[in-house]
Amino acid sequence: MSDVLLVFLYALATALATGLGALPFLFVGEISDRVLANSHALAAGLMLGASFGLVSEGTAHGRMETLGGTVLGVLFILVAQTLLEDYDEEELVFGAARGESARKMLLMLVVMTVHSFSEGVAVGVSFGGGVTLATVITVAIAVHNIPEGVAISAVMRPRGVSVAKCAGWSVVSSLPQPLMAVPAFLFVEAFRPALPWGLGFAAGAMIFMVLVELLPEAFDEGRRASVATLTTVTIVAMVLFQRFL
């Protein structure tokens, strides 16, 4: 097997792992306002916890580059929001959802897809240190992707998207990983300086998405104390989860 094919298959495995995040929603019954609020709180906690890990990893490669990437991530979401708001509410459709629900799901997918680019680069660059290091990094990213799939499904499932489609869209959001891993492996020295920018970009986009989209809606739909508690516990759990990977 060629090295390029091996890199692609490793990165593809990390993308497929994201789909596993939809499986817990097989056991979620009626989607009430409370379930919607808790789903948003769960997604917010997972994304914030992941963002802290991205910033930590990014600063190890370049502090100012990570900060610059974070600012670009925030600007990216502001532009994406503006573009989506330009659509008439009835014209914006995503699956069976329309209007505001469709906008939220599209924004979530955009954010998580952009995040996947930096993870793909990380997999490709890791092969520069040998197959053993690459295997460790790939397994870590694959396991890390499962909670990201949970976060995506937590936004989509309460809006009527089937579990199978939640899994499918979760995998789609991670397809940049195999697409970016191969060029990053072939041109490792050229891609390495871009890594902190990409990690910061993903962190900034996710944090901003949480603060302006997920948490406000969670607080509107559920009890503030419950939402705050679930978000806090999920952040800590995600940080610890990444710490032990």
Image (cartoon, rainbow, N blue to C red):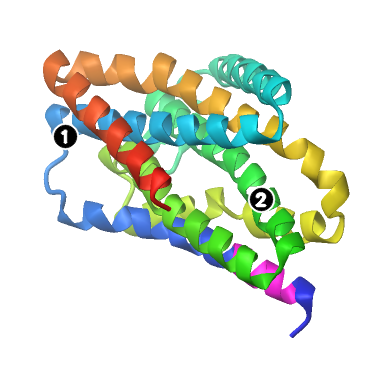
Residue 237 screen position, x and y as percent: 28, 39
Q: Is residue 229 visible?
A: yes
Q: Which residue is mark 1?
A: 35
Quadrant where the N terminus lies? Answer: bottom right
State the image quarter where residue 205 is shown: top right
Q: Which residue is mark 2?
A: 122
Residue 125 on the magenta span: no
State the image quarter where residue 55 is shown: top right
Q: Which residue is more in the foreground, 111 or 45?
A: 45
Q: Amino acid at mark 1?
A: Val
Q: Give the magenta part as a residue range.
A: 5-11
Q: Is residue 123 above or below residue 130?
A: above
Residue 4 screen position, x and y as percent: 78, 72
- At a point 53% along the width and 61% down the height, the residue shown is 14
* Left or right of residue 134: residue 186: right
Residue 203 screen position, x and y as percent: 55, 28
The secondary structure that most of the magenta stretch takes on is helix
Q: Is residue 156 visible?
A: no
Q: Amino acid at mark 2?
A: Ala
